[in-house]
Image (cartoon, coloured by chain):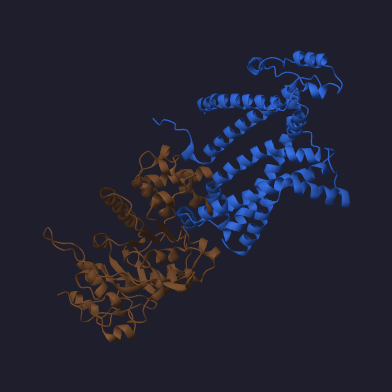
Chain colours: A brown, B blue
Amino acid sequence: MKTAAEQAPVKRSRAAEAPAASSEAKAHDVVLQVRDLAVDIRTHRGTVRAVNSVGFEARAGETLALLGESGCGKSMTAKALAGIMDPVCDLADGQIVLNGTDLAALSAKERLKFAGPGLGIVFQDALTALNPVYTVGTQLGEAFRIHRGLNARQARAEAIDLMKRVGIPEPESRVNSYPHQFSGGMRQRILIAMAVALNPRLLIADEPTTALDVTVQAQIMQLLRTLREEGQMAVILITHDLAVVAEEADSVAVMYAGNVVESGPVSEVFADPRHPYTKGLLESVPVHLERGAQLKSIPGSPPELHDIPAGCVYQSRCPLVQDICRAERPALRPVTSPVNDADAGTATANVPSGGPSRPARTAACHFSEEITNA
Amino acid sequence: MLIYLRKRIVSSALPLVVVIVGVFALARMTGNPASLYLPLNATQQMRDDFTARNGLDQPLLVQMADYFGGVFRLDFGQSLRTGQDAAAMALRAFPATLQLAATTMVLAVLLALVVGCWAALKPNGIADRISSFVSMAAASIPDFWLAIVGIWVFAITLGWLPTSGVSGASAWVLPIATLLLRPFGVLVQIVRGSMVSALSEPYIKLARSRGAGELRVVTHHALRNAAAPALTVAGDLTVGLVNGAVVVETIFGWPGIGKLMIDSILQRDFAVLQAAVLLTAVAIFALNILIDMGYALLDARVRPVTVKA
């Protein structure tokens, strides 16, 4: 499974290719590397940093979960990756390296070439994400018209194929329907179809199942899994649902107040959290509770973006807070994992070029070695 | 669609009857035409003869019943002034008004779309501020004042344009410019507002994520969503133009329906006034039906439900 190091030359050669050309990928190749990503929001009260030196990587055929509370910068990160930030947001710093091309360094116009063939994005609310005045066929076909120059008839045929691929019944007649004529689950399928239309290497799914009921959620996650395996896409799954992360993701990056506070393979992070925030989140999952027992939660709420403290971002809610936490912000550092000690030594944080053989385990806490699962 | 149209036409009938009754009653409150059409020294006998000849001695309800009877036979009466068929006079004047209104609205809509979209691209940007100032000014200037200033500057002082009449293309400039400003100003603000909100919708972000460029996002994705409010207001403004060209037509001596109405009020030419108002009302109902069909064309969600098999 984890032998990507041997495939490094293969990966490098592909990095030089145009984004549309590379539709196949070897499993576990690093498709996307994000380094030091920072996003500023211009507000009436001055500029605030919503995403701060965020780094992670996404691998072909694997799912990376971005996990965190509302307002922690997950969606902002996703929009920055896709190049569709709100007008009041600026990409302040960082690199977004997709198959060897740094998207952050491109002009808006050059970047449009990657929107679709390079990466696709799925939003949470499929009803507002679909244009109400055009048929789904028109919208599904648009990517083909823009990037491949197909005419209306050819684009419609591609749209029908896509609808088949994502399991929409009777695509030949439904292609002429409007978004409001579909159920929530079907709309989400259409949205996913749009995102994977041009076989992107990276699929960003921003809470794709939050607006759906539970049975449909399972179907949509199944569809995403199938498409990921078929296309060997890297998937970035944004969610606040710990169960979804545990089930679907290979690795996880936990975000808090715009920072990644812990990252690593899901099995290790969940079994042995090394940041008090991750630990708090995991403990808030109700398991084997007696009726009437108190539900656990993390007291307090995330800091306002206007007054992020100078030291550790989590200091105001952390049970382990010390003086050093208030004075000095802990960097994201590699941590050793007793769960998988043999590999732990090879893990390095915030990988330069080349990439490690497996996702690194990192945490941003002065006391990450002292946090135990006990 | 045909069923829908028929329903709309039937439901317009009652308001039209109300319009006729209202105009009929109001017109007769202006006084007896006899005092206008007969010499000042006419005898009472002559006055009574005139009144009786034109059926004005009958009780109001009887006159009205007669008139409605005529309307059903498509007989709208004759002009007191010219003796011509009243409906023919109204129909002859109407195209001049329609041409003026249509040209004005087409120009106003096109200009407002360009300026409104331009302003919406960067809310509170420099373009937005300029267009906000210009459109506010345009919407606020009274047309009668502008018409007179326009005549004074361009027709009298500079002598570039004719003061009035319909002689050649240059005669269109001042009436159109006068009529244009308000619809343009109002529409810029409507287009700008609905474009700003359309451009912030998630489907716009998603379109960008498919690689749609700025031009495509604005003209293809946002504009059609933003068009409905503009259509409503443009329809309303067109009604205002068809109706309210009265002032501008009078000032510029434009031989349209507005001028015909004013003239027939001043002359107590009841049949012509009624025919003109009725024609205008029918045109406005037709326009409203067209606007509703326009909504349906723009947005499938407001189409009359078709049963799916």
Which residue is located at x 47 percent, y 64 percent? A83
| Quadrant in the rendering for residue B281 | top right
- Mark yes or no: residue A350 visible: yes
In the picture shown, does residue A270 fall above or below A152? Answer: below
Rendered-image quadrant of the C terminus of chain B: top left
- Measured from the top left, where is residue A69 in percent x and y? 31, 65
Indicate left or right for B70 with B223 as reference. right
- Measured from the top left, where is residue A4 in percent x and y? 32, 71
Q: Nearer the viewer, residue A5 or B76?
A: B76
In the picture shown, does residue A27 fall above or below A303? Answer: above
In the picture shown, does residue A9 fall above or below B146? Answer: below
Indicate left or right for A52 with B16 as reference. left
- Measured from the top left, where is residue A61 in percent x and y? 33, 62
Indicate left or right for A315 with B189 as reference. left
In the picture shown, does residue A124 fall above or below A251? Answer: above
- Measured from the top left, where is residue B263 in percent x and y? 78, 31
Q: Nearer the viewer, residue A5 or B89?
A: B89
Residue found at the far left of this picture: A290
Which residue is located at x 62 percent, y 61 percent? B129
Q: Nearer the viewer, residue B223 or B81?
A: B81
Which residue is located at x 83 percent, y 52 percent? B153
Q: Nearer the viewer, residue A148 or A237?
A: A237
- Mark yes or no: residue A363 visible: no
Q: How many marks?
A: 0
